[in-house]
Image (spheres, rainbow, N blue to C red):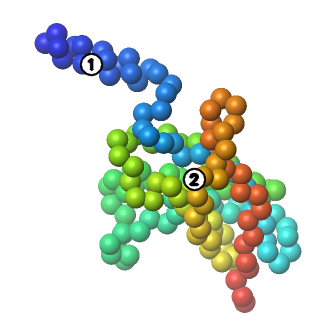
Protein backbone atom coordinates (compact mmCIF):
# COMPACT_ATOMS: atom_id res chain seq x y z
CA UNK A 1 0.00 0.00 0.00
CA UNK A 2 2.84 2.40 0.86
CA UNK A 3 4.59 1.48 -2.39
CA UNK A 4 1.44 2.32 -4.40
CA UNK A 5 1.15 5.65 -2.58
CA UNK A 6 4.77 6.48 -3.38
CA UNK A 7 4.25 5.66 -7.08
CA UNK A 8 1.13 7.85 -7.18
CA UNK A 9 2.99 10.72 -5.47
CA UNK A 10 5.93 10.40 -7.90
CA UNK A 11 3.59 10.53 -10.91
CA UNK A 12 1.75 13.51 -9.45
CA UNK A 13 5.01 15.33 -8.76
CA UNK A 14 6.35 14.58 -12.23
CA UNK A 15 3.13 15.94 -13.75
CA UNK A 16 3.77 19.31 -12.09
CA UNK A 17 7.03 19.87 -13.92
CA UNK A 18 7.11 21.91 -17.11
CA UNK A 19 9.75 19.82 -18.84
CA UNK A 20 9.07 17.80 -21.97
CA UNK A 21 7.83 14.25 -21.41
CA UNK A 22 8.66 12.87 -24.81
CA UNK A 23 11.73 13.10 -27.00
CA UNK A 24 10.28 15.99 -29.03
CA UNK A 25 7.48 18.51 -29.28
CA UNK A 26 5.69 19.90 -32.29
CA UNK A 27 6.73 23.51 -32.94
CA UNK A 28 4.53 26.58 -33.14
CA UNK A 29 3.69 27.12 -36.84
CA UNK A 30 2.73 30.45 -38.34
CA UNK A 31 2.20 31.77 -41.84
CA UNK A 32 -0.05 33.72 -44.17
CA UNK A 33 -2.37 32.27 -46.83
CA UNK A 34 -2.79 34.26 -50.05
CA UNK A 35 -4.69 33.71 -53.30
CA UNK A 36 -2.14 32.82 -55.99
CA UNK A 37 -3.88 34.82 -58.72
CA UNK A 38 -4.56 38.09 -56.84
CA UNK A 39 -2.02 37.95 -53.97
CA UNK A 40 -4.92 38.92 -51.65
CA UNK A 41 -5.29 37.35 -48.18
CA UNK A 42 -7.54 34.28 -47.96
CA UNK A 43 -9.64 34.57 -44.82
CA UNK A 44 -11.39 31.63 -43.13
CA UNK A 45 -9.17 28.98 -44.77
CA UNK A 46 -9.00 25.85 -42.60
CA UNK A 47 -5.46 24.99 -41.46
CA UNK A 48 -4.53 21.80 -39.62
CA UNK A 49 -1.20 20.36 -38.57
CA UNK A 50 -1.70 16.67 -39.33
CA UNK A 51 -3.62 16.78 -42.57
CA UNK A 52 -6.66 14.79 -43.50
CA UNK A 53 -6.78 11.53 -41.53
CA UNK A 54 -6.05 8.48 -43.61
CA UNK A 55 -7.66 5.15 -42.81
CA UNK A 56 -7.23 1.73 -44.35
CA UNK A 57 -10.66 2.09 -45.96
CA UNK A 58 -11.07 5.65 -47.23
CA UNK A 59 -14.87 5.30 -47.32
CA UNK A 60 -15.15 4.48 -43.60
CA UNK A 61 -15.38 7.36 -41.11
CA UNK A 62 -12.67 7.82 -38.46
CA UNK A 63 -13.14 5.80 -35.30
CA UNK A 64 -12.65 6.32 -31.53
CA UNK A 65 -8.97 7.01 -30.96
CA UNK A 66 -8.59 8.67 -34.37
CA UNK A 67 -11.22 11.21 -33.35
CA UNK A 68 -9.70 11.71 -29.90
CA UNK A 69 -6.23 12.63 -31.14
CA UNK A 70 -7.37 14.80 -34.03
CA UNK A 71 -7.01 18.53 -33.31
CA UNK A 72 -9.66 20.99 -34.45
CA UNK A 73 -8.44 22.95 -37.50
CA UNK A 74 -8.02 26.70 -37.12
CA UNK A 75 -9.17 29.40 -39.52
CA UNK A 76 -7.04 32.12 -41.03
CA UNK A 77 -7.92 35.67 -39.94
CA UNK A 78 -8.97 38.54 -42.24
CA UNK A 79 -5.31 39.07 -43.21
CA UNK A 80 -4.87 35.37 -44.08
CA UNK A 81 -2.61 34.79 -41.06
CA UNK A 82 -2.65 31.71 -38.85
CA UNK A 83 -0.80 30.36 -35.82
CA UNK A 84 -0.84 26.72 -34.73
CA UNK A 85 0.47 26.68 -31.17
CA UNK A 86 3.19 24.28 -30.06
CA UNK A 87 2.10 20.82 -28.93
CA UNK A 88 3.89 18.54 -26.53
CA UNK A 89 4.02 14.91 -27.51
CA UNK A 90 3.93 12.23 -24.84
CA UNK A 91 5.90 9.35 -26.26
CA UNK A 92 8.64 6.95 -25.42
CA UNK A 93 9.52 6.07 -29.01
CA UNK A 94 9.46 8.35 -32.01
CA UNK A 95 6.96 7.24 -34.62
CA UNK A 96 7.62 7.17 -38.32
CA UNK A 97 7.67 10.58 -39.93
CA UNK A 98 8.66 12.40 -36.71
CA UNK A 99 11.12 14.59 -38.62
CA UNK A 100 8.38 15.98 -40.90
CA UNK A 101 5.45 18.27 -40.15
CA UNK A 102 2.40 17.78 -42.34
CA UNK A 103 0.24 20.82 -43.05
CA UNK A 104 -3.24 20.74 -44.60
CA UNK A 105 -4.93 23.93 -45.90
CA UNK A 106 -8.34 24.05 -47.52
CA UNK A 107 -10.93 26.62 -48.52
CA UNK A 108 -13.91 26.16 -50.85
CA UNK A 109 -13.09 27.58 -54.28
CA UNK A 110 -9.37 26.82 -53.92
CA UNK A 111 -7.21 23.76 -54.52
CA UNK A 112 -6.47 21.98 -51.22
CA UNK A 113 -2.81 22.07 -50.17
CA UNK A 114 -1.13 19.21 -48.31
CA UNK A 115 2.58 19.58 -47.79
CA UNK A 116 5.43 18.55 -45.49
CA UNK A 117 8.06 20.68 -43.81
CA UNK A 118 11.22 19.30 -42.21
CA UNK A 119 11.47 19.79 -38.43
CA UNK A 120 15.04 20.99 -39.03
CA UNK A 121 13.61 24.35 -40.22
CA UNK A 122 12.21 25.09 -36.74
CA UNK A 123 14.03 27.66 -34.62
CA UNK A 124 13.92 28.31 -30.88
CA UNK A 125 12.17 31.35 -29.43
CA UNK A 126 13.09 32.79 -26.04
CA UNK A 127 11.60 30.50 -23.41
CA UNK A 128 12.49 27.35 -25.34
CA UNK A 129 9.46 27.28 -27.69
CA UNK A 130 10.33 25.95 -31.13
CA UNK A 131 8.75 27.84 -34.00
CA UNK A 132 8.42 27.39 -37.74
CA UNK A 133 7.63 30.56 -39.72
CA UNK A 134 6.33 29.51 -43.14
CA UNK A 135 5.86 32.94 -44.69
CA UNK A 136 3.36 33.17 -47.54
CA UNK A 137 1.47 30.12 -48.75
CA UNK A 138 -0.33 30.52 -52.08
CA UNK A 139 -3.66 28.81 -52.81
CA UNK A 140 -4.62 28.25 -56.43
CA UNK A 141 -8.25 29.01 -57.31
CA UNK A 142 -10.25 26.10 -58.71
CA UNK A 143 -10.77 26.40 -62.47
CA UNK A 144 -14.37 27.24 -63.21
When the figure is inspected, residue 97 is found, relative to residue 86, above or below; the finding is below
Q: Residues within 10 Å of mark 2 (few under 14, many from 20)?
A: some
Residue lying at the far top of the rendered structure? 2
The reply to whether discs 1 and 2 touch (Cβ–Cβ < 8 Å) is no
Q: Name the residue that disc number 2 marks.
A: 119
Image position, residue 57 (x, y; %): 33, 75
In the image, 30: left or right of 24? right
Image position, residue 12 (x, y; %): 35, 19
Quadrant of the frame with the C terminus: bottom right
SS at badge 2:
helix
Q: Nearer the viewer, residue 4 or 65?
A: 4
In the image, 133: left or right of 67? right
Quadrant of the frame with the N terminus: top left
Q: Image point 85% across, 70% down: which residue? A: 39
SS at badge 1:
helix
In the image, 12: left or right of 4? right
Q: Name the residue that disc number 1 marks.
A: 8
Image position, residue 54 (x, y; %): 41, 68
When the figure is inspected, residue 17 is found, relative to residue 100, above or below; the finding is above
Amino acid sequence: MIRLGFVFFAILLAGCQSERWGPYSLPRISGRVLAADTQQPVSAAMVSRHGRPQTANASSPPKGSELMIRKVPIRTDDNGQFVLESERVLSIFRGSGWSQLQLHIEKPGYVTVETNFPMSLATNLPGGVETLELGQILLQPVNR
